[in-house]
Each structure stands twice: as C-alpha cells, then as structure tokens.
Image (spheres, helix red, strand yellow):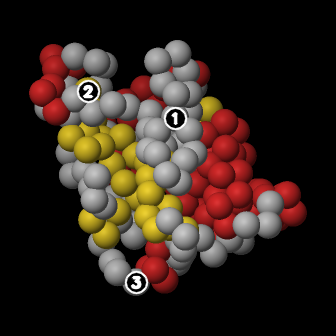
Amino acid sequence: MELLLESERLEDYLREVPPIVVFNTPLVRANIKAIEAEASTAEERAKLAFLVARDMVHHSFDTKNSTVTINAEDALAQHEGICFAKSHVLATLLRGMGIPAGFCYQRVLRKGTVESGYALHGLNAVYLPQVGWFRVDPRGNKPGIDAHFSATEEQLAYPIREELGEVDYPNVFTAPLPAVIESMEGSKDSFELFFKRPQAL
C-alpha cells in the first residue's frame, strides 16, 4: 500500500500533541531512557518501543478491564488501553526519541460479522531513513492475531476484508483523530467505548 502522508514535513511527525503525546512525563521518560540504553540504532529503538506498546500495555477488550486510558503516561501506568491508547504510547515513545511516527486507522468489523457493525482500529506508521515509511500495529497478540515489527514486510493485526466492508485507510496523520479522542473521553468505561468508537474516518 502507498501511504498518504498528511504532511511532507518530518518535523510534523516528531512534535508533541498535548495532552495525548507528551514526552516529559515520568514513565515515558523512564521507558525512553531504558530503550536508548539498550539499543543504539533507530530501527532497534523503534522495535523495542513497539514491544513496549504491544506487550506491556494489555488490550482492555482482551482483558475485559473497564479502564479507559488515552495518553501514553496513563496507559503505561495502568498497563491497560485499547488499540488507540497503544498507538498513542508507541507514537509518544518514538517521537520522544526523535523517530518520526504517525497515526493510521482501519475500519474493521466490531465483532466479526457485518451485523455487529464497524469500528475504527488504530495503528502507527514509522519513518526510518533507510527504509522510509512503514506501518506497524501494537494492538497486542492473542490467538488469531499475530502482529510483529517489520520495516520490510507489513505484519498487522487484522487482514482487511474489503468484501465485508472493511477499509484499510492509507492515511498517516500527524495527530490522533479528534473523533477518536472524543469517543475515548466520552466513555465512562471500556465497555461503553467498545460501541462508541467511530465507525469510519
């Protein structure tokens, strides 16, 4: 897929987006420091940040945890968040290390059937000088979902089934979608958020 950048300026994919993407909070800084101590190249650091977002923050729909986290600090503190929060964690860690990152979305079936309706799913795009832009999905793995970090061969959480009305949007946004943030802020718990998520871009 040819990705559609919202901005051609890499610096737009490095900036903070308060209060969602903020670099100087305690857990964000601690994770960045640990990643930078362990890895020296941008690709190695990007992969470690991906693993933090994918594996250290549990997907609230999988754990059936009612907590709604939105920004990276809260998701890291609670070890909980849905796909949007996990994408916010990854973008925050990457941008905090000077690695450009954007926000991407897919339209997927809410419960696997057309009758269940649709919801947006959040993931990320990452820029590395040697490879350009590529997408990764820190959603979190479980039986039937096996997403991995790869700069050369995309391995995302969901195969998009266009015949069922699912959509793989090529857009790479500089900030999270306002409608996504509104749905998260307006939900009293993750169970309500499951149904409040936007259905399309």
CA–CA distance in space, label 1 to label 3: 28 Å
Residue at point 27%, 65% (across, down): 4
Percent position of residue 79, x then y: 68, 38
Tags 3 and 2 in contact by the CB under 8 Å rule? no
Q: Which mark is residue 9?
A: 3
Secondary structure under tag 1 reads loop
71 lies above or below 122: below
Residue at point 44%, 33% (across, down): 157
Residue 104 visible in image: yes
**Disc 3 vs disc 2: which is toward the camera?**
3
Residue at point 30%, 43% (across, down): 106
Q: Which amino acid does label 2 sit on?
A: Leu
Q: What residue type is labelled 3?
A: Arg
- For label 3, the crowd category at 10 Å Cα-Cα, with few meaning under 14, some 14 to 19 and many 20 or more, is few
Say which label, 3 or 2, has the lower sequence index. Answer: 3
CA–CA distance in space, label 3 to label 2: 33 Å
Percent position of residue 176, x then y: 39, 60
Residue in the foreground of this view, choosing between 31 and 81: 31
Q: Which mark is residue 109?
A: 2
